[in-house]
Amino acid sequence: MIVGATPRFRQIMFEVWKPLTILFVWDVAVTAFHFMTPIKEPPLPTALFGTAIALFMGFRTNAAYARWWEARTLWGALINASRSLSRVARSLSEGKDDAEGLHQDVVRRQIAFAHAIRCQLRREPAYDEIRRIAGETLAEMVVKKTNPANAILNSISLLFASALANRRIDTIQQAMVERVLVDIANAQGGMERIKNTPLPNGFRFFPNLFTRLFCLLLPIALVESLGLWTPIGSTLIGLVFLAVLSIGEDLTDPFANTVHDVPLTAMCRTIEIDLLESAGLEAPAPLKPVHGVLW
């Protein structure tokens, strides 16, 4: 995620320079054709066409941002539920035999869960992260599953089921834990829904098609009034439309592991710090932005 209030014009140009270069060449060609031939271009209703495209692109950008914001909200819910799980595990095990062992085991597995779901959403292997946090035994067990994060969540539930069987907690206390685990599972399901359900094809195909068509028609409509300034004027207008188009495309997948991504790594580090400190364990330092980007 790009942080800071300063617009990153270089990033925008990096994403749109190819179509913008093609557009500039086309604008120069149209301008040269206008001055070197007696054929005059027909009048085109580009103002009306541009207004319709702007509305269409606005709807698409809003839909894409709604997906991005929902992803951030779900991760916020996961952070809160992780803190609640650690607090509940500590309170239920307080004063019992091996209290610290149960609490620390729950904490490590919940941290491993957060990293596992992050890796799954970004289509990255999760074995190393799980092994680093929860040990090789758990990592070997869950990476063989279709959904390693869900397998880790099930293992946390089994820890409390074992505590119930050993009469370290009662059924009411276990039900309290299960409510927190349900909140975690609901957040995971929402993240997977966003990742596995792209925007409808029409929301992606038609804005791209109509924007590029508008950029092609724009110099034809402007050359009569702008003259030799047509390449500059048309390219600047095209830059605006192409930038908005790129923004909508960037927000479509909030887990794509790009600079526009929801900062999953930083939020996993937040969970790791909070839970390790709650268990009295050494915690790493918070992640800081790298060249203005928080990953």
Image (cartoon, grey):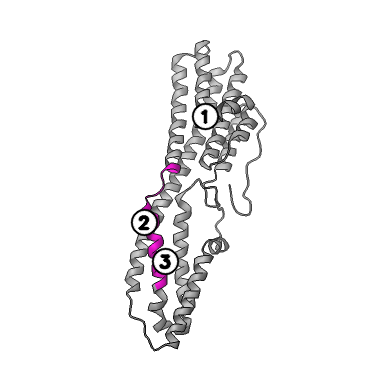
Badge 3 element = helix
Q: Residue at x 60, y 38 (%)?
A: 269
Give the side of residue 203 with respect to residue 76, left or right.
Answer: left
CA distance for labels 1 and 3: 44 Å
Q: Are marks 2 and 3 in contact (CB under 8 Å)?
A: no
**Is any part of residue 26 visible from this angle?**
yes
10 Å crowding of disc 3: few (<14), some (14-19), many (20+):
some
Residue identifier under label 2: 59
Residue identifier under label 1: 145
Looking at the picture, how far across and down is residue 257, in whole percent?
Answer: 55, 47
Badge 2 element = helix
**Is any part of residue 135 visible from this angle?**
no
In terms of depth relative to the viewer, which is nearer, 211 or 3? 211
- Amino acid at dot 3: Arg
Looking at the picture, how far across and down is residue 258, in whole percent?
Answer: 55, 51
Q: Residue at x 58, y 42 (%)?
A: 265
Give the side of residue 279 with respect to residue 73, left or right.
Answer: right
Q: Which residues are magenta?
A: 194-216
Q: Is residue 78 magenta?
A: no
Mark found first going from the N terminus, 1 or 3: 1
Q: Are marks 1 and 2 in contact (CB under 8 Å)?
A: no
Q: Residue at x 41, y 72 (%)?
A: 216
- Amino acid at dot 1: Lys
Q: Residue at x 40, y 83 (%)?
A: 225
Badge 1 element = loop
- Amino acid at dot 2: Phe
